[in-house]
Amino acid sequence: MGALIEFNKISKIYKIGGSDVIAANKISYKIHRGEYIAIVGQSGSGKSTCMNIMGCLDVPTSGNYILNGIDVAELNDDELAVIRNRTVGFIFQQYNLLAKLNVIENVELSMFYAGVLNTEMRERALKSLERVGLSNKIMNYPNQLSGGEQQRVSIARALAGNPSVILADEPTGALDSKTGRDVIALLEDLNNEGNTVVLITHDNFIAQQSNRIIRLQDGKVIYDGPSNESSKIQTEEVLYEI
Amino acid sequence: MKFSRTLRLALKSIVTSKGRSFLTMLGIIIGVAAVILIVGFGNGMEGYVTDSFKSMGTNLLNVNITGRGSTRSVSVDDMYLISDENIDLFSAMSPMVTVDATVKLGTTELDETTVMGVGEDYINMKMYELSNGRFIAYADNLSRSKVCTVGSYIEDELFSGDAIGQTLKINGNYFEIVGVLEESADNTEGSSDDYVYLPYTTAAKLLGTADISTYSYAMLNEEQSEESIDVLEGVLYKVFSSEDAYRVNSISEIIDTMTSMINIVVIVLSIIASISLLVGGVGIMNIMLVSVSERTREIGIRKALGAKRKDILFQFVIEAGTISAIGGFIGILTGYALSSVATIVMSMMMSVDIKVSPSLWSVALAFGVSAGIGILFGFLPARRAAYLNPIDALRYE
């Protein structure tokens, strides 16, 4: 079986005010099923671009992106929507829950677009809310929940769609450090249960919790290896910045 | 399943901003109510006109002889002959002599009472029934007798239910009441129950004239009105050699003309009222465009979670359609309420019984058009939402 995610010389060039901005410059890497990986970099390093392309929210300017054996670079808007729906579970920094829907309706949303039957949808949503420890708040609305709870709802939403990969974009960015640690611990548990988790962060400490780190700088991969060996580079970088 | 959930979502977002939703609906509400009210008025007028003419008898043709000087004229016998020679078309004929008379009983004067000289068949032509005594007879006309048959109102009002054998003073002459007709129009003053019928010969004498200018023919079949008119006009043309000397009218033709005139007015007014529906549609489009930009982030989230373009399109079109359908529904209720009010006000102010009754088709049309307008004008904003780029939408603040 091949890799779950395969980037082959992915480039993304934005045109801003007539000049080209290279956000990703021939990035290549593979992510396998069951991995817990962090993509780290400062802002402008290209990690958001990678996240958007991995999540099929955007298409690369050049290069191939093979997700689950499908080359998604050539797909149109609606085909990408189907791939996102079936393959990717998003966890965003700002939670991105819909304020007008209650907790369980939020969790059901991606299954709703997948056309899952009502009863099955409810069952799966309850199960994943139970998994994140929120089965007592299913009828609450997002604004009645704390930040940590909202982020857990969004994790439940990502889980309920039964995706091949969970993409967490700065999931602790809006949380205090304790709640942040809880969320990271939850992601780790999910990985231990067999889910592929990709963590996108600028925070080196959080990145250290993963098993593997891909470090990006100026649209290029500067490190790809086990997380415990990346500290050396991290230190060098910090020294360099000073 | 998707539909019911989308509909519920649409209702939810309408309810969460009640004030805005109501203002958006207002154009639709006014338009629908106006169309329903106008069509209701049209129906009321049509009903009123039809009823008033029908009471004159739709099986009757009226002939008016204006004549050409004194050189040529037709006699009553000539006119009877037309009916007798065309028994396949006409069942009866009666001369009609309206007398502008003062009717008195003692010192009481009847102002509203109509006095009319008729032939003996008139009672059958109008399908009236006698409640007592007899109608004007052939012999009465022959001998110009001073007898009369009266409507039920006169008997009840002046003779407290026992008029036979009593006398009425008409233009100074005493007439013996020989018969009373049964009630045919609510027994009110000035109605067809407030009539005094004389022999037409006596009535002509009262007026001091020998020429009778108005005749009424009863047709065997209303469908044959064209043929019947042709026959009458044919005979009269032979006598007068001029089309201006006479006029033949059928009540059903008059009703048809009036009805189509009312319909034209109703259609024109409805089109004007529909402009409000159009304006309402533009209002919906405007508010949906605002809604789309307010909810850009929501659209981004939905797209990230796998909503296709048509899902987003559907959501916003349903929302716009729901707003205008609710507006249409409120408009229908308002239209009906206003129709009842208008009926009451008109009967109080003008003492005419015009019943403002909206047609079912106008209700269905107004509702369909309003829902359709919502969908039509909701489509552009919905399309804009559907084509948003998911990343831009997600990052939108």
Image (cartoon, coloured by chain):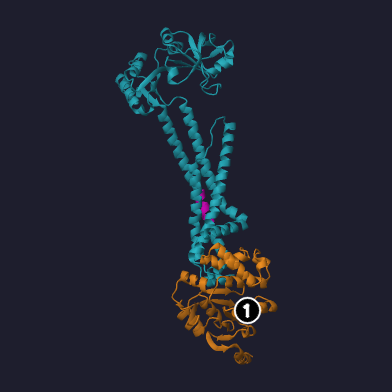
Q: Is A107 on the left or on the right of B76, as rendered? A: right
The answer to whether residue A110 is above or below residue B208 is below
Locate the C terminus of chain B and report the quarter of the image it occupies. bottom right
Q: From which residue to which does the magenta span run?
A: B275-284
Chain shown cyan: that is B
Residue B121 in view here? yes
Q: Amino acid at mark 1?
A: Asp
Which residue is nearer to you in this view: A46 or A229? Answer: A229
Nearer to the camera, B231 or B99: B231
x and y percentages locating residue B131 in the rendered image:
51, 16
* Quadrant hosting residue B345: top right
Task: Inspect the magenta stretch and tell me whether residue B283 lies in it.
Answer: yes
Task: Name the residue rendered at 54%, 85% in the picture.
Answer: A218
Q: Residue at x 57, y 16 (%)?
A: B156
Looking at the picture, how far across and down is residue B26, in whole percent? 57, 50
Q: Which residue is mark 1?
A: A189
